[in-house]
């Protein structure tokens, strides 16, 4: 938890620095209102806190405290026919409940995207995209916090794609890439030995000892599409969504990986806001434990549709 707080403090400090730089640049550009060239930077910091305290409460319940932080940064550069877009999304959430001394993770994401395009014809760009996703801290099979199921760079996803980008306006784009390389990284050897996240698992001899450790990387070649849309729904309510599709040409191309994220920000005043984020995920290479009869015993494992929703109210600063 201390490491996470240090990271959050650093990113907030870094973001404020960007905000100050951006404000200075905007002042310098007041005489160039007709120009769209150069850098455009900004972002949003949101910190949501929830606390529940119960004393002799007849209806029951548990004391709890939770926190969720969201950091969204962007930096775009327009230079002639070239357009370079960069996005960094970081979120982290945790909860401490009842007499439990440990903080349990509720949200954890690092998502960086860099895309460069060169105008081909009206609203279309030849483009290359690089995307990397991972998380900050280990994840456990709660309430059993002794079984580690994920960690920093376990998994990590590195994706590189070349294709065409349709951009009718700044807040909308459709990137289509017939040539895409996707690399899954699992640096935790215990997880890679178990074949987590689709990497090749370890092999064992007749005595149960490891003959060959599991692979730490898996590479796929396929097709990729990303759709991005951002809109002000009404006054003080903004929405943005990212929808990613990937098909592995070499193995089960019909089983398409899906990632759909939505973030809705509702501003109360300059510093207070509410955020609602959802993430629907399906990856054919990620096996989920399935308990068919709810007896606490895993009956089978296999890919499943995953869904996450986070609602928070707290401090927000946009720059």
Image (tube, rainbow, N blue to C red):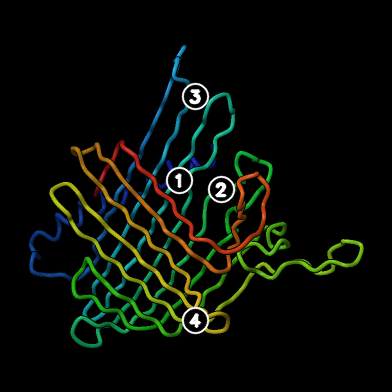
The residue carrying mark 4 is: 222
Please rate how many residues cluster around mark 3, counting C-alpha atoms within 10 Å: few if below 14, some from 14 to 19, many from 20.
few
| CA gap, disc 4 and disc 1 | 31 Å
Mark 1 vs mark 3: in front: 3
The residue carrying mark 1 is: 92
Mark 2 vs mark 4: in front: 4
The residue carrying mark 3 is: 62
Q: Residue furthest front?
A: 293
The x, y position of residue 285, in whole percent, is 58, 68
Q: Mark 1 or mark 3, which has the lower sequence index?
A: 3
- At numbered mark 1, what does the secondary structure look like: helix, strand or loop? strand
Q: Mark 2 or mark 1, which has the lower sequence index?
A: 1
| CA gap, disc 3 and disc 4 | 48 Å
Q: Quadrant of residue 295?
A: top right
127 or 144: nearer the viewer: 144
The residue carrying mark 2 is: 137
């Amino acid at each position: 938890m201390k490491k996470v707080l240090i990271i959050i403090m650093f990113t907030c400090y870094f973001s404020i620095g960007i905000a100050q730089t951006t404000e200075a640049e905007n002042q310098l550009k007041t005489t160039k209102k007709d120009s769209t060239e150069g850098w455009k930077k900004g972002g949003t910091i949101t910190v949501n806190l929830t606390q529940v305290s119960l004393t002799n409460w007849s209806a029951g319940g548990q004391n709890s405290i939770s926190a969720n932080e969201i950091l969204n940064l962007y930096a775009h550069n327009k230079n002639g026919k070239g357009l370079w877009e960069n996005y960094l999304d970081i979120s982290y959430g945790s909860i401490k409940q009842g007499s439990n001394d440990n903080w349990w993770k509720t949200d954890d994401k690092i998502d960086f995207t860099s895309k460069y395009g060169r105008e081909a014809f009206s609203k279309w760009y030849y483009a290359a995209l690089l995307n990397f996703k991972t998380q900050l801290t280990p994840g456990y099979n709660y309430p059993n916090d002794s079984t580690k199921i994920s960690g920093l760079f376990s998994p990590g996803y590195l994706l590189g794609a070349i294709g065409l980008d349709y951009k009718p306006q700044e807040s909308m784009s459709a990137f289509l890439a017939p040539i895409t390389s996707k690399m899954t990284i699992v640096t935790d050897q215990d997880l890679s030995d178990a074949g987590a996240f689709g990497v090749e698992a370890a092999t064992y001899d007749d005595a149960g000892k490891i003959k060959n450790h599991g692979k730490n990387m898996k590479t796929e070649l396929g097709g990729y599409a990303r759709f991005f849309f951002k809109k002000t729904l009404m006054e003080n309510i903004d929405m943005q969504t990212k929808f990613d599709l990937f098909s592995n040409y070499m193995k089960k191309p019909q089983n398409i990986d899906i990632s759909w994220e939505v973030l809705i920000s509702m501003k109360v005043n300059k510093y207070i806001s509410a955020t609602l984020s959802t993430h629907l995920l399906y990856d054919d290479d990620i096996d989920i434990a399935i308990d068919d009869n709810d007896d606490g015993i895993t009956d089978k494992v296999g890919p499943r549709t995953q869904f996450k929703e986070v609602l928070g109210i707290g401090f927000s600063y946009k720059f």
